[in-house]
Amino acid sequence: MSARNPLAVAGAALMVALLALAAGLPGAGSDRPGHGQAVNRAAKADRLEPRP
């Protein structure tokens, strides 16, 4: 692949990153501990209704 157009190369890299993120592949940040939806939901619940 010739990199004559840097914008096209950047666009292709962005598409690959978005597809990996949407597919939940390892390395896209979806498998890192502490970054799941359940953790975010628990943190939001703590902010909205603090524990006594």
Image: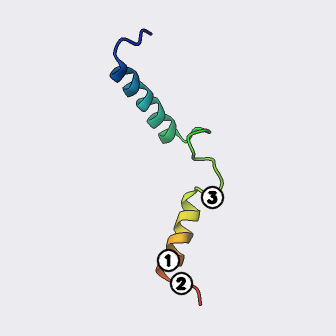
Q: Which quarter of the image is occupied by the N terminus?
A: top left
Q: Which residue is mark 2?
A: 50
- On screen, residue 25 above or below 11: below
Q: CA distance from mark 1 to mark 2?
A: 6 Å
Q: CA distance from mark 3 to mark 1?
A: 17 Å
- Residue 6 rendering spot, x and y as whole percentages: 36, 20
- Residue 7 rendering spot, x and y as whole percentages: 33, 23
Residue lying furthest right in this view? 33
Which structural element holds mark 1? helix
| Label located before the other in sequence (3 or 2) | 3
| Label located before the other in sequence (3 or 1) | 3
Q: Which quarter of the image is occupied by the C terminus?
A: bottom right
Q: Amino acid at mark 2?
A: Pro
Q: Which residue is mark 1?
A: 47
- On screen, residue 41 above or below 12: below
Residue lying furthest top in this view? 2
Residue in view at x 46 percent, y 79 percent: 48
